[in-house]
């Protein structure tokens, strides 16, 4: 089935009890036992399972073309659940431009538990192969990356990881399964900040991990969800199921708008560089064309000058909101170095733009005014 149809139907049926077309919101934390003490209806307690959470997990699984999804209360909770499956003595190799929150977990928390992280340029094939030596258990990539929009060849990364006996984990937050399906290119698990495109309206915090197959890795992450109490609340799951119904048509609008905005910025004299994989000038354009359908709604650009010029431009905007986060209907912009702090790789002159689904002419007019 096509993405448009999966977004509306996957994981959900008409409610057999009432005929309701949209899935009922089940808030009950506990579920009745059968007379013989069993749980034939499949649910016991809210931390272990909930019908809305289960529907969301089935829906994301179908959209990504995976085996099973485990949903979390945030993207960071999803990332943490994946990382805790590592054991003392293991090493994880991480693409250097990975989301700063994930890098901070690996720098601030995991070394004390004997897990070593190596950060590499995942586009440098030699460096990547050299880093992925025993005891590497996991290679973590994010493409396009945040905030520099570097494109990593997923298939090439999978080959290196698998040759080393490691798992490839691919963050798909910036693209959503409509634009990119990492399982088709060899990934073993896909991580989402569901907060972003999947829910899509800047009103849900959630995360998810999708697995290619059953096994010990999936079992450990699923067990962590209930044992650590890292479970998404039913209303967030319900709102995500509502948002995901328009995912395919939203992504089409995000991609078209972002390309128009990127072309405008590339031609503007106050802009020195535009990072958007849909531009022919982007070093990852050919790989992006191979593994993406459309180029997503995220871009970043650098202004002539530095931090002061970047903040001055942001202060002049009227439509595009100065706010962190991404993937919602509203266009959002932010100065990335100042939010990421000391470990940032973002230049001071760089701003990141999540292009919303407003009319592209209105977004461009706002940027044009602010750049003057
Ligand atoms: C936002 C984001 C996260 C963190 O997700 P939360 O839902 O905010 O916890 C992780 N990775 C990427 C790429 C993100 O954009």
Image (cartoon, rainbow, N blue to C red):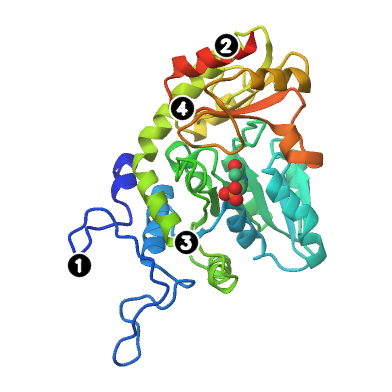
Q: Secondary structure at mark 3?
A: loop
- Whichever of callouts 3 and 1 sits on the residue coming sooner in the sequence is 1
Respond yes or no on whether mark 3 lies under 8 Å from ligand 1. no
Query: Disc 4 to disc 3, how far (Cα)?
Result: 30 Å
- Check disc 3 and report the residue beneath it: 233
Which quadrant of the figure has residue 188?
Answer: bottom right
Q: Residue shown at 77%/60% (left/top)?
A: 109
Left or right of 255, for residue 40: left
Query: Disc 2 to disc 4, how far (Cα)?
Result: 20 Å
Q: How many marks?
A: 4
Q: Secondary structure at mark 1?
A: loop
Q: Secondary structure at mark 2?
A: helix
Q: List x then y, in percent, for residue 359.
A: 42, 20
- Check disc 1 and report the residue beneath it: 17
Does residue 187 show up? no
- Check disc 4 and report the residue beneath it: 255
Tell me the crowding category of disc 4: few under 14, some 14 to 19, or many 20 or more residues within 10 angstroms, Cα based.
many
Q: Residue shown at 78%/50% (left/top)?
A: 118
Point out the image quarter for the N terminus.
top left
- Whichever of callouts 2 and 1 sits on the residue coming sooner in the sequence is 1
Mark 4 or 3, which is nearer the eye?
Answer: 3
Query: Disc 3 to disc 1, how far (Cα)?
Result: 23 Å
Nearer to me, 92 or 174: 174
Respond yes or no on whether mark 1 lies under 8 Å from ligand 1. no
């Amino acid at each position: 089935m096509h993405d448009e149809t999966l977004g509306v139907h996957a994981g959900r049926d008409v409610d057999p009890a009432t005929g309701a077309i949209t899935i009922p919101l089940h808030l009950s934390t506990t579920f009745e036992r059968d007379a013989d003490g069993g749980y034939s209806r499949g649910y016991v307690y809210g931390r272990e399972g909930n019908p809305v959470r289960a529907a969301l997990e089935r829906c994301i699984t179908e959209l990504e073309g995976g085996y099973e999804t485990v949903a979390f209360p945030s993207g960071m909770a999803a990332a943490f659940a994946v990382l805790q499956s590592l054991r003392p003595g293991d090493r994880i190799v991480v693409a250097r431009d990975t989301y700063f929150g994930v890098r901070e977990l690996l720098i601030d928390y995991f070394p004390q538990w004997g897990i070593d992280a190596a950060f590499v340029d995942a586009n440098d094939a030699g460096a990547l192969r050299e880093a992925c030596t025993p005891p590497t258990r996991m290679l973590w990539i994010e493409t396009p990356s945040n905030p520099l929009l570097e494109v990593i060849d997923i298939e090439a990364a999978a080959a290196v990881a698998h040759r080393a006996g490691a798992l490839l984990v691919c963050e798909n937050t910036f693209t959503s399964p409509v634009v990119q399906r990492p399982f088709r290119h060899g990934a073993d698990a896909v991580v989402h900040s569901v907060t972003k495109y999947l829910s899509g309206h800047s009103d849900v915090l959630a995360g998810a991990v999708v697995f290619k197959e059953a096994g010990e890795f999936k079992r450990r992450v699923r067990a962590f969800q209930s044992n650590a109490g890292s479970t998404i609340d039913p209303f967030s799951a319900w709102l995500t199921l509502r948002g995901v119904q328009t995912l395919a048509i939203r992504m089409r609008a995000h991609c078209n708008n972002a390309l128009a905005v990127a072309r405008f910025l590339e031609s503007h004299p106050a802009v020195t560089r535009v990072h958007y994989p849909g531009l022919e000038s982007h070093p990852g354009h050919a790989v992006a064309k191979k593994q993406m359908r459309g180029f997503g709604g995220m871009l970043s650009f650098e202004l002539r000058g530095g931090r002061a010029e970047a903040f001055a431009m942001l202060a002049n905007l009227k439509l595009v909101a100065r706010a962190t986060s991404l993937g919602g209907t509203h266009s959002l912009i932010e100065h990335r170095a100042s939010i990421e702090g000391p470990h940032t790789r973002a230049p001071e002159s760089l701003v990141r733009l999540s292009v919303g689904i407003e009319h592209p002419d209105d977004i461009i007019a706002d940027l044009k005014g602010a750049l003057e």
